[in-house]
Structures are given as C-alpha cells and as structure tokens.
Image (spheres, grey):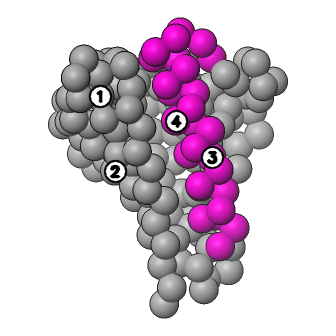
Amino acid sequence: MSERFVELERLLDASPSRVYRAWSDPDALTGWFAPDVEGSLAPGARSTLMWPDRSLWIDVLEAEPDRRFRFRWAWLEGDDITTEVRVDLEPRGYGTRLVLRDGPFELDRQGGLDAWAEAIEGWAESLANLRAQLDFSVDLRRLRGRAGAGPR
C-alpha cells in the first residue's frame, strides 16, 4: 500500500491561544475556513463543516488548549476517503509555530491520489487564509471570490 501525508509548517505572529481558538471555536473557524459550522467542535462530538457546494462531517478527537487540535474527517462527500488531521502549536517568540499533518492518503485506492493533491492545495490555501486572518485581519476568500478553501 502506498500512503502519503500532507505536512505543512507555518510561523504566525498570533499567540498560541489565538491560533488554537481559530481551530477549536466554530465562530472563529468560519472566519478563515468553512463558512458555516454545525456543532461544537468539542472532543467526542461530530460536527459538520459547510461550504456552499458541499458539507463534510468532522469528529474532534483531541483538543489540548494552546497546544494541539486533532480531528478525523471525510475528504469527499460520503465516507470514501477519511483522514486524520493533527495541528500542533508551540510558542515561537511572540508568535506560534503551527505544524499540520493530514493523512494517510492511500494513493493506490481510487480517488486517493486526487484527494492527496487537493489536500496539498487546499491546506496551503487555507493556512494562508488563517495567517491573513490572524496576523492582518484579512479574509483572502473574499479577495479571491471563493466561499472557502478546504476539501473539494
């Protein structure tokens, strides 16, 4: 079996508590990722992330304030491809070092390669929007005319 992960690192000017809140609070998450969230994003809860053209379930597995947010979700509508996302945060100067890992994507499974490629593009775009939102109070989705980055 051929598995791949998406691994990205970003340095943000925002504190770990602000970055953690951006992931763990439904109202904050809508400011940079999914336009709408149904549910609490609490550990053990199943919530739904909604975009104009799709909705995906998300199961929060771990939420350690200011340090880690981990969840499982379906990359495509339905449950054909599910991955686990782990977001680790650590203080770096006055800001935060964010490390994101999403996967595994099984490349030999139908749709696996496409999902992995879309994950790379989607997370790069989403993390750019997260940084713009936290560091500059700008929503890049509005500038690009998109209703939200993330899985397609």
Of badges 4 and 2, nearer the viewer stands 4
Q: Amino acid at mark 4?
A: Leu
Quadrant hosting residue 32: top right
Does residue 4 appear in this view?
yes
Dot 3 or dot 1: first in sequence order is 1
Height in image: 10 above or below 6?
Answer: above
Residues drawn in magenta: 113-139
Report which residue position mark 1 lands on. Answer: 96
Quadrant hosting residue 13: top left
Could you tell me which secondary element the residue under label 4 belongs to?
Answer: helix
Q: Amino acid at mark 2?
A: Arg
Dot 3 or dot 4: first in sequence order is 3
**Extreme residue in the front direction:** 93
Dot 2 or dot 1: first in sequence order is 2
In the image, residue 93 lies at what x, y percent?
A: 22, 23
Res. 127 mark: 4
Res. 4 mark: none
Of badges 3 and 1, nearer the viewer stands 1
In the image, residue 82 lies at what x, y percent?
A: 50, 64
Identity of the residue drawn at 76% across and 18% down: 143
Of badges 1 and 4, nearer the viewer stands 1
Report which residue position mark 2 lands on. Answer: 86
Height in image: 82 above or below 121?
Answer: below
The span from disc 3 to disc 2 (Cα, nearest Å) is 15 Å
Identity of the residue drawn at 42% across and 38% down: 10
Dot 1 or dot 4: first in sequence order is 1
Report which residue position mark 3 lands on. Answer: 122
Task: Determine if the magenta segment contains residue 129.
Answer: yes
